[in-house]
């Protein structure tokens, strides 16, 4: 899901690969699941791969004692504000219900 408050024509590349340029402008909302306690951790970042590595290596205080972790869900947003709003939503009761429905087949087996 890409949520944006800016038109795509404003998110264009001046030079180089437009897809890579576009991807470098995205913010990712992600959900990790602890293999240890089966609980979720939700966050947002600009560098999904790098942030997951930080979590996996124990460099994030809120998840270091809950490793190993699995990346089970992510969404892309064009603005930081959209990503923060989505992260906060996914942490609500209705957001957790959405994730439960979205990930039903993954979570049940």
Image: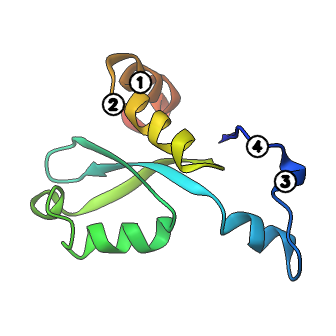
Mark with earlier residue (1, 3): 3
Q: Which residue is mark 1?
A: 95
* Residue furthest out toward the left: 65
Residue at (56, 40) in percent of width and height: 82
Q: In which quadrant will I find the N terminus?
A: top right
- Classify 99 as above or below 17: above
Label 1 to label 3: alpha-carbon separation: 30 Å
Labels 3, 2: front one: 3
Task: Give whichever of 58, 68 is nearer the camera.
Answer: 58
Residue 15 place in picture, x, y as percent: 89, 81
Label 3 close to label 2 by CB (< 8 Å): no
Question: Can residue 2 be seen from the camera position used here?
Answer: yes
Q: Quadrant of residue 89?
A: top left
Q: Which residue is mark 2?
A: 91
Residue at (18, 72) in percent of width and height: 58
Mark with earlier residue (2, 4): 4
């Amino acid at each position: 899901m890409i949520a944006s408050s800016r038109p795509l024509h404003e998110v264009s590349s001046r030079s180089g690969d437009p897809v890579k340029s576009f991807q470098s402008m995205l913010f990712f909302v992600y959900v990790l699941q602890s293999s240890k306690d089966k609980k979720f951790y939700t966050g947002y970042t600009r560098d999904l791969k790098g942030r997951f590595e930080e979590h996996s290596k124990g460099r994030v205080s809120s998840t270091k004692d809950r490793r190993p972790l699995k990346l089970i869900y992510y969404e892309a947003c064009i603005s930081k504000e959209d990503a923060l709003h989505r992260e906060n939503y996914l942490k609500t009761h209705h957001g957790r219900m959405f994730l439960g429905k979205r990930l039903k087949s993954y979570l049940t087996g």
